Image (cartoon, rainbow, N blue to C red):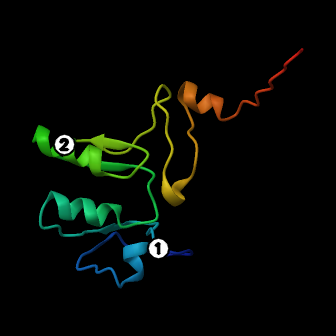
């Protein structure tokens, strides 16, 4: 345990989470890893999409069919395959559902900050 002034929460792994628990529906900010057990790919997609959030997701697989199924089935602004979520300036980044609208970064992101004006003359 770390002593001294301030707050400290030790890194924690939580398993056995059910849909009736608050942690199932809310993001845990801090050194907390939540582990969900899925029976198969369809069940994993059901669990992953059963949220009001959709910023980004990460999958790990060596099976190209499974990869395609997960990419297609995940409802998120980004899917990272065999790596963690990261922002690249050349790729648009943003979420779905309650994780925001629009995109940042890349040409698509720049357009989010542009106000267009149409002028028509007869």
Q: What residue do we see at 58% from left, 43% from top? A: 102
Number of numbered discs: 2
Q: Which image quadrant is residue 83 in?
A: top left
**Could you say where residue 30 lies in the image, as x and y percent from the top left?**
44, 66
Point out the residue furthest to the left here.
63
- Quadrant (top left, top right, bottom left, bottom right) of the C terminus: top right
Return the residue nearer the eye: 96 or 105. Answer: 96
Q: What residue do we see at 45% from left, 72% from top? A: 26
**Could you say where residue 68 lies in the image, as x and y percent from the top left?**
20, 41
**Could you say where residue 100 lies in the image, as x and y percent from the top left?**
56, 52
Disc 1: CA contacts within 10 A as few (<14), some (14-19) or many (>=20): few
Q: Is residue 1 visible?
A: no
Q: What residue do we see at 31% from left, 61% from top? A: 48
Which numbered mark, 1 or 2, is in the foreground of this view? 2
**Could you say where residue 18 lies in the image, as x and y percent from the top left?**
29, 81
Q: Is residue 42 visible?
A: yes
Separation of disc 1 and disc 2 at Cα? 38 Å
Q: What residue do we see at 32% from left, 51% from top? A: 74
Up-down: is 89 above or below 98? Answer: above
Return the residue nearer the eye: 111 or 80. Answer: 111
User: Could you tell me which secondary element the residue under label 1 belongs to?
Assistant: loop
Judging by the rendered image, the residue that carries numbered circle 1 is 8
Judging by the rendered image, the residue that carries numbered circle 2 is 67
Drawn side of residue 57 relative to residue 117, left or right: left
């Amino acid at each position: 345990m770390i002593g001294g002034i301030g707050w400290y929460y030790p890194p924690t792994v939580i398993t056995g989470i059910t849909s009736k628990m608050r942690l199932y529906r809310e993001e845990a900010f801090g050194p907390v890893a939540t582990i969900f057990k899925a029976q198969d790919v369809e069940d994993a997609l059901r669990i992953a999409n059963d949220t009001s959030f959709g910023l980004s997701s990460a999958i790990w697989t060596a099976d190209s069919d499974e990869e395609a199924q997960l990419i297609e089935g995940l409802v998120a602004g980004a899917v990272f395959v065999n790596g963690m979520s990261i922002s690249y300036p050349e790729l648009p980044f943003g979420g779905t559902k309650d994780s925001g609208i629009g995109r940042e970064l890349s040409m698509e992101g720049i357009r989010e900050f542009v106000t267009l004006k149409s002028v028509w003359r007869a």
